[in-house]
Amino acid sequence: MPPIPARKVTEYRTRCKPTWCPGCGDWGIWASLKTAMAELKLDPDKTVIVYGIGCSGNMANTIRTYGFHGLHGRALPAAEAIKIANHALTVIVVAGDGDGYGEGLNHFIQSMRGNHDLTYIVHDNQVYGLTTGQASPTAHQGFAAKSTPHGVLEEPINPLTLAVSAGCGFVSRGFAGDLPHTSQLIKLGIQHKGFSLVDILQPCTTFNKINTVEWYREHIRKLPEDADRSNRLNAWKLASDLDRLAVGVLYEENKPSYTDRLPQLEPGPLVSQSLTRKNLTSLYKEFE
């Protein structure tokens, strides 16, 4: 088999430009994703990115791969269907914390339970930026926003502890202000066989004046690359520490993915299998 030719980041560009605010963390995630794809030499024609609704979803027209812009909170089931229909494709999901951990929370849990071979990249800035700054499910208790002028009453969703407890095989967190590290996490997530979570902390320069770039730099700690990733209890402890936010791979476990468990896919991807009609007459006899 001939070697896969090297690819440049420019190969994943389109003529469309994002409309994010200056200083938005989405710029860093966008650059990190394209860098990761280039370093993995992903073929744009064999890669599908499914986008949720929100500022993160505005990336849809700016990366040259196949793309699907889904409903709010429903990016994961669409991605699962694409992967089952053609498991030879690389399928990536881009969502936001409001999109993915709010309306899409149930899909998040079920996708991890099924261990669908998807890379879930979540833009986590604690607000619904596209609808002008309401508090998202990851907003800290007491956070004052348009929807909660007196402060958020609920406890925040912790996506990492949720992922560890739901049996996610790859749990990681990055920071949009550290492009090389975030790009590396995305690469590892794509290479992982099964469901991989890459939660990326990012600032919203327009609607979140608390969790700024400076705030994150003071509160995050980067895990060493040789840290033990196999200890689920330790991963839970790292994910539970909200004072020193661990960035890196917290947990990794290799196990069969959803499509690996489907005997119907052993002959090859569904899209490549014959559509010849089957004779079901023998099955009807028991109802006669």
Image (spheres, rainbow, N blue to C red):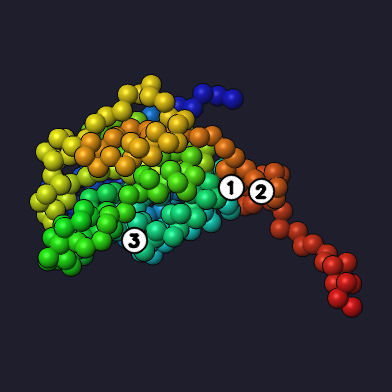
- Give the residue displayed 15% in from the left and 47% down from the top: 211
- Label drawn at residue 262: 2
- Residue 75: x, y in percent? 42, 58
- Quarter holding residue 288: bottom right
- Label drawn at residue 52: none
- Give the residue displayed 38% in from the left and 39% down from the top: 236
Contact, mark 2 vs mark 1 (Cβ under 8 Å):
yes
- Residue 270: x, y in percent? 64, 52
Which residue occupies the foreground of this view, 18 or 222?
A: 222
Regarding residue 108, the answer to whether it shows in the image is: yes
Question: Which residue type does callout 2 highlight?
Answer: Leu
Q: Earlier in the sequence, mark 1 or mark 3?
A: 3
**Which residue does the numbered mark 3 point to in the structure image?**
102
**Which residue does the numbered mark 1 point to in the structure image?**
258
Q: Is residue 91 left or right of residue 258?
A: left
Question: Which residue type does callout 3 highlight?
Answer: Gly
Residue at the farthest bottom position: 288
- Give the residue displayed 75% in from the left and 59% down from the top: 276
